[in-house]
Amino acid sequence: QPYWARRVAELGIGAAHDGPVPTAGSLSAAMETALAPETRIRASEVARSVRADGAAVAAKLLIKMFGRA
């Protein structure tokens, strides 16, 4: 999970907790980041760029290419 937390923070769509044990201060800072308007805006931008499920996309392409059996 540290990898995904880091990615979320790098993308600007949330916060990663620093250190092995959360404190009231670190949790408060993470919540502040997560609830910030700029984080919400960035999360919306990233959500629009996320590709649909690969299996569903592949199935639609195959049906389009070969038609229904």
Image (tube, rainbow, N blue to C red):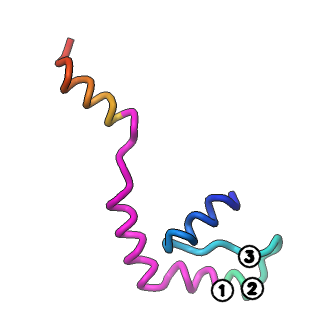
Kind of residue sitting beneath label 2: Ala
- Could you tell which of marks 2 and 3 lies nearer the N-terminus? 3
Q: Which residue is mark 1?
A: 28
Relative vertical location of residue 6 with respect to residue 15 in this rendering, above or below: above
Q: Which mark is residue 56?
A: none
Q: Left of 52 or right of it: where is 22?
A: right
On screen, residue 8 above or below 30? above
Category of crowding for the residue at label 1, using alpha-carbon neighbours closer than 10 angstroms: few (below 14), some (14–19), many (at least 20): few
Given contact means CB atoms under 8 Å apart, are the residues at marks 2 and 1 in contact? yes
Classify 10 Å Cα crowding around label 2: few (below 14), some (14-19), many (20 and above): few
Mark 1 lies on a secondary structure that is: helix
68 versus 44 height, above or below: above
The reply to whether the C-beta atoms of the residues labelled 2 and 3 are less than 8 Å apart is no
The label on residue 24 is: 2
Q: Position of residue 13 (x, y in %)?
A: 49, 71
Q: Position of residue 2 (x, y in %)?
A: 70, 61
Q: Quadrant of the N terminus?
A: bottom right
Question: Tag 3's secondary structure?
Answer: loop
Q: CA distance from mark 2 to mark 1?
A: 6 Å
Amino acid at circle 3:
Asp
Please report the residue visible at 57 percent of the width from the left and 71 percent of the height from the top.
9
Lateral position of residue 2 relative to residue 67, left or right: right
Residue 18 circle label: 3
At 69% across and 81% down in the image, what residue appears?
27
Q: Are marks 1 and 3 in contact (CB under 8 Å)?
A: no
Q: Give the mark, 1 or 3, whose residue is nearer the N terminus.
A: 3
| Quarter of the C terminus within the rendering | top left
Q: Secondary structure at mark 2?
A: helix
Q: Which residues are magenta?
A: 29-55
